[in-house]
Image (cartoon, helix red, strand yellow):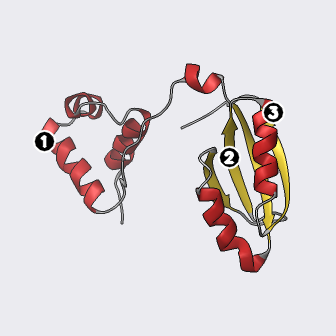
Amino acid sequence: MTIDQTDRLLLVLLTENARASVAELGRKLGLSRTTVQSRIERLERRGVIAGYTARLSDDHEKGLVKAHVLITAMPKLAPKVETELRRIPEVRTLHSVSGHFDMIAIVVAPSIGELDQLIDRIGGLEGVERTMSSIILSTRIER
């Protein structure tokens, strides 16, 4: 599906604040409320906008330890590893990647000790051959 520059700007605004009113979005885009509403509905119908979610505050997130966990899985068991990772609520994001590792999981835990246990849990999943982790010290850009 092709989207124009106005739709792209609308998507950026919704990514920044999905709860922004249609009137506020219209003002920022220089469009009427009805035009913005119809654009949003069209983007939803076409599957460009798949849903809306809550973004947690920086104060809440500050208390969590985050890490990237690189995972090598046995090829035949990779789908099982993915299924098991989906069941772990501390796994925020899972990427399939090329290179020496098969997946990168972004994980969170309340403390270093609990992060250590989480990484051990991931490494102990059937089908996981090895893991390598990096603790995230700070996030410089998040969109």
In the image, what residue type sits under mark 1? Thr
Q: Position of residue 44 (x, y in %)?
A: 28, 55
Tell me: 138 left or right of 3.
Answer: right
Residue to which mark 3 is pinned: 113
Quick one: label 3 or label 1, which is nearer the N terminus? 1
Q: Residue at x 21, y 42 (%)?
A: 36
- At mark 1, the secondary structure is helix
Q: Position of residue 19 (x, y in %)?
A: 32, 32
Q: What's the mark number on residue 34?
A: 1
User: Which dot, 3 or 1, sits closer to the camera?
Assistant: 3
- At mark 3, the secondary structure is helix
Quick one: label 2 or label 1, which is nearer the N terminus? 1
- Residue 9 is drawn in which quadrant? top left
Q: Is residue 68 above or below residue 97?
A: above
Residue to which mark 2 is pinned: 106
Between the C-alphas of marks 3 and 1, the distance is: 52 Å
- At mark 2, the secondary structure is strand
Q: Position of residue 137 (x, y in %)?
A: 77, 29
Q: Position of residue 41 (x, y in %)?
A: 22, 52
Between the C-alphas of marks 2 and 1, the distance is: 39 Å
Do labels 2 and 1 touch, CB within 8 Å?
Answer: no
In the image, what residue type sits under mark 2? Ile
Q: Label 2: how many residues lie within 10 Å, few (<14), some (14-19) or many (20+)?
A: many
